[in-house]
Image (tube, helix red, strand yellow):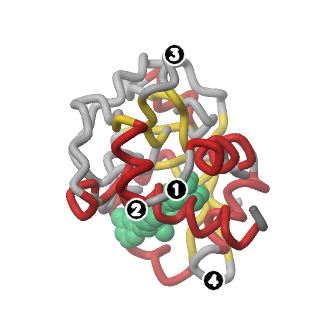
């Protein structure tokens, strides 16, 4: 497949495995898994195409279960799933990429998960900048994750290395 085709399939997977499984008649398990066979039929793609998209995806957004018969998105859901991720000790500092127009609200009320299940945080400034750049000129915030953890806030890390937490109160946020 060419890159355009893999990106097109990846976008469809993101949509249906994170936000709208019902649109293609899919039901996710409570922990977010979809049966691979059913997904292939619904999207009219082959197992080889799916494997290639999963394997080459730049953010490794999707993962198969141990048997290879089920697939799920590793983060980013808006549908009600519980990925069952264990709490993890975050690095002392994490980053969040956003854009200037959200800054006043964020510094006032903190980071909220908006439509997703959790606030998404990055381990590096570079990654955060890329996340913010999806919406315009990126603005990067530093999150004092060590202080949050010490205060009892829980963190999880997704299978593809995105740090997740329920919310970030403003006192832990700093402009980079
Ligand atoms: C902002 C992509 C106003 C927040 C990325 C962001 C990521 C607030 C937007 C993943 C706010 C939500 C998630 C507040 C947060 N007031 N705005 N209190 N709190 N915001 O897309 O972090 O490519 O849900 O700054 O790479 O941008 O899909 O979150 O701009 O990992 O795999 O509200 O999605 O991954 O936007 O991105 P999103 P995000 P994928």
Q: Tell me how far mark 1 sits from mark 4, CA to CA.
A: 33 Å
Q: Nearer the viewer, residue 147 or 65?
A: 65
- Percent from the top left, x then y, of residue 109? 33, 61
Q: Are marks 1 and 4 in contact (CB under 8 Å)?
A: no
Q: Earlier in the sequence, mark 1 or mark 4?
A: 1
Residue 56 vs 34, above or below: the answer is: below
- Secondary structure category for the residue under label 2: helix
Q: Are marks 4 and 3 in contact (CB under 8 Å)?
A: no
Residue at the image point whose x is 61% and y is 62% from the top:
97
Q: Is residue 107 visible?
A: no
Read off the residue under disc 1: 45
Q: Is residue 132 visible?
A: yes
Q: Is residue 18 left or right of residue 149?
A: left
Q: Tell me how far mark 2 sits from mark 4, CA to CA.
A: 22 Å
Mark 1, ligand 1, within 8 Å: the answer is: no
* Mark 3 crowdedness (10 Å alpha carbons): few <14, some 14-19, many ≥20: few
Mark whose residue sits in front, 1 or 3: 1
Q: Nearer the viewer, residue 36 or 139?
A: 36
- Percent from the top left, x then y, of residue 29? 24, 32
Read off the residue under disc 2: 15
Q: Nearer the viewer, residue 158 or 50?
A: 50
Q: Nearer the viewer, residue 16 or 90?
A: 16
Q: Tell me how far mark 1 sits from mark 3, CA to CA.
A: 21 Å
Read off the residue under disc 4: 136
């Amino acid at each position: 497949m060419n890159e355009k085709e893999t990106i097109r399939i990846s976008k469809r997977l993101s949509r249906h495995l994170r936000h709208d499984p019902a649109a293609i008649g899919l039901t996710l398990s409570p922990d977010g898994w979809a049966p691979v066979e059913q997904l292939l039929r619904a999207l009219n793609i082959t197992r080889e195409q799916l494997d290639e998209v999963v394997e080459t995806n730049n953010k490794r957004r999707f993962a198969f279960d141990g048997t290879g018969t089920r697939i799920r998105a590793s983060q980013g859901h808006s549908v009600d799933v519980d990925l069952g991720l264990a709490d993890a000790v975050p690095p002392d500092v994490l980053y969040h990429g956003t854009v200037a127009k959200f800054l006043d609200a964020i510094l006032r009320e903190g980071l909220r998960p908006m439509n997703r299940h959790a606030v998404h945080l990055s381990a590096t400034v570079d990654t955060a900048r890329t996340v913010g750049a999806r919406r315009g000129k990126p603005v990067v915030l530093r999150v004092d994750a060590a202080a949050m953890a010490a205060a009892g806030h829980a963190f999880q890390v997704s299978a593809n290395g995105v740090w997740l937490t329920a919310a970030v109160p403003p006192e832990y946020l700093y402009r980079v």
